Amino acid sequence: MVRLYLPNDTSSRAAGAARLAEVWQERTGIELIRTSARGAFFLEPMVERDMPEGRMAWFNVTPDDLPQILAGKGGTPVNEIPFLRGQTRVTFANFGVTQPLSLDEYRAHGGLKGLEAARTQSPEAIIEEIRISRLRGRGGAAFPVWHKWQVARETEADRKYVVANADEGDAGTYCDRMVMEGEPFRLIEGMLICARAIGADTGYIYCRQEYPAAAHTLRAAIQKADEAGLLQSHGHRLRLEVVVGAGSYVVGEETALLESLEGRRGVVQARPPYPAEAGLHGKPTIVSNVLTFATVSTILARGGEWYSSMGTERSRGTVVLQIGGRVKQPGLVEIPFGATLAEALERFGGGMAPGSRLKAVQVGGPLGSLFPVSKLGIQICYDAFAKAGAILGHGGIVVFDHETDMVELARHYTVFTAEESCGKCTPCRVGSLRSREILERIQAGRGTADDLALLADLGETMKTASLCAFGGRAPYPVLTAIEHFGEEFRRLTK
Amino acid sequence: MDGKSAVSLEVVLDRCRHGPGQQPNILQTLLAVQEALGHVPFNVVGEIARGLEVTEADVAGVLSYYPDLRTHLSGRHLIRICMGESCVANHCSRVLRELRDQLRVDVGETTPGNRFTLEKVYCVGNCAVSPTVIIDDELYGRMIPSQVASLLDQYR
Ligand SMILES: Cc1cc2nc3c(=O)[nH]c(=O)nc-3n(C[C@H](O)[C@H](O)[C@H](O)COP(=O)(O)O)c2cc1C
Ligand code: FES
């Protein structure tokens, strides 16, 4: 019996793993182990097996490749794959190795060590460890995690909540999905540590509707964790539930998310009060991103000092990039903060897809700025991006090629923001719609130079007067497109 | 509405009823109704509101807010094409054009024989294997326009 490892991740399945499993299911002599994915999606479907010389991998496998794999021919040692070898895998260290729903394998690969450490510590000591790690939230706003936990801990209440933001709305990002599908116990462990630190007895994972496999895997993992007696917080059973949403980008904003959890329209609420003081049902609530919780367990296991030894002065630890678009090697990259965007693209992106040339790079999702080739020297850390008026967001990097029409791309952003604006504040609701109309006028050849000035004006108003970062950031992709590719716009205006 | 779905609406509302001292969850109720009926027709808003002890405006407000709550039944097969930036960068517009040409409908429309409804979605996390098209529960990656016709043939 030859044991073959085949990822069961959504993207691996879409790349062909589902078909391989279907065809090979019937075969005698092989045992298929369905694992998480390594994140090297350009190589998927990727099949692995243990050989005397170590774990070997076969890339872009088709059903007909089976004889070769069984003969042990033509494989590549996994630890020699350049895309993976160049990374510093911390949160994603076990990806591609373990079976998502095996608690034993999770434990055997270092899982639950953070929780065990936390259970020997006081809540204050846990928060202190997170403070030392200098971990900042990975959902986009990059707020110091320990500080939020401290506020929730110190706010008196009969009930507190811990909520994982699994809305992962930024197009081009999928690391939360990979955590939930690939190592669900890691998210649960992080939430349990947080629950202990702040004194919560109920947790929710708000998972976007577009991730059915993630919700399914999480529910199964929660049940296993419960059966193993893990769902405990300061002596009580922690109630942990997956709640699935119904679309909407803005629902990923924390106050909108809590509205949605309570079943109302997912509309942004003015802050303060912040959720850490008054969140779900008015009680202290920690809303954190999936990746943030997933990082917490390793910090508790290996120490805040160790985690903060990586990265730059104000961006500690590792950054999880998700490289996509027209590059040869799209996939998940975990490296310490501090490399430049150009370096990351060169070392991992592998150059452009055949026949295409790089034109622009967008970082940080649909609200992120566009970078032309000349600006790729920027360092990947919160400070450098803030200084450039850009955002790292959730780590999405999308590469556009020379065939991209920048006016059409700008219009695409305004269609998105006009559709997704929650409508609560006027600058965003009206500004996004007007921007779209102006760009459509320009595209139709009826625009004037004044229209470009008007777009800039509207953008400034939205930046300063919107209620949340959605309206505040919406102008950036459009305005950076005009800034760096202005000729394409001016050509269409008289 | 036929008798069968009327019964199931009642059952659904019964299941979603909130306990004493609890707030009703309108969104989760509407999702449960949609699960049972395939959509949330406007003419059941009143019954849902009464069941949850909220106003009809409360229910209608939530119903209109969330893109995945539908007030009309879709075709037998729902096609969703991703318009997220990774798919856009990989020229999903060409796949969309092919889909439109083949189906002769635009985004948001249903084909005359009720076979397909075409919709768009903003990212499903398959960005590294894009462009992405989803038909019902099946996700297809690395789509190119020339694959569209044979893909549609698999769905009758
Ligand atoms: C329009 C908008 C959309 C957002 N979407 C998400 C999201 O999908 N996932 C997420 O974790 N945070 C999202 N955020 C950030 C959250 O408001 C919040 O800062 C975050 O969940 C806190 O978790 P963290 O401290 O771990 O980053 C969004 C913010 C805005 C303004
Ligand atoms: S952008 Fe299309 S799947 Fe993410």
Image (cartoon, rainbow, N blue to C red):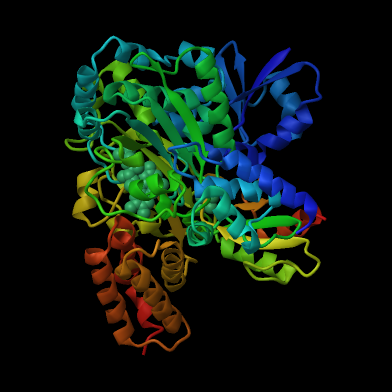
In percent of the image, x 43 and y 16: which residue is there? Answer: A111
Identify which residue is drawn at 69% across, 56% down. B78
Q: Is residue A443 visible?
A: yes
Answer above or below: position of A42 versus A359: above
Where B129 sits versus A218, above or below?
below
Q: Looking at the picture, does residue A199 appear above or below residue A462?
A: above
* Left or right of A420 in this view: B32: right
Q: Is residue A412 left or right of residue A303?
A: right
Horizontal and vertical percent for residue A272?
Answer: 21, 48
In the picture, the quarter occupied by the N terminus of chain A is top right
Q: Nearer the viewer, residue A328 or A288?
A: A288
Residue A150, by quadrant, is top left
Question: Does residue A355 appear in this view?
Answer: no
The image position of residue A241, as x and y in percent, is 49, 31
Relative image position of residue A16 (x, y in whole percent):
67, 39
Which residue sits furthest left?
A313
* Left or right of residue A74: residue A161: left
Q: In the image shown, does A77 or A12 lie closer to the viewer?
A: A12
Residue A375 rendering spot, x and y as whole percentages: 28, 57
Q: Say left or right for B73 vs A166.
A: right
Q: Quadrant of the C terminus of chain A?
A: bottom left
In this view, the residue in front, A250 or B139, is: A250
Residue at position x 69%, y 52% in the image = B38
Location of residue A442 (image quadrant): bottom left
Residue located 33% across and 26% down the image: A200
Q: How many marks?
A: 0
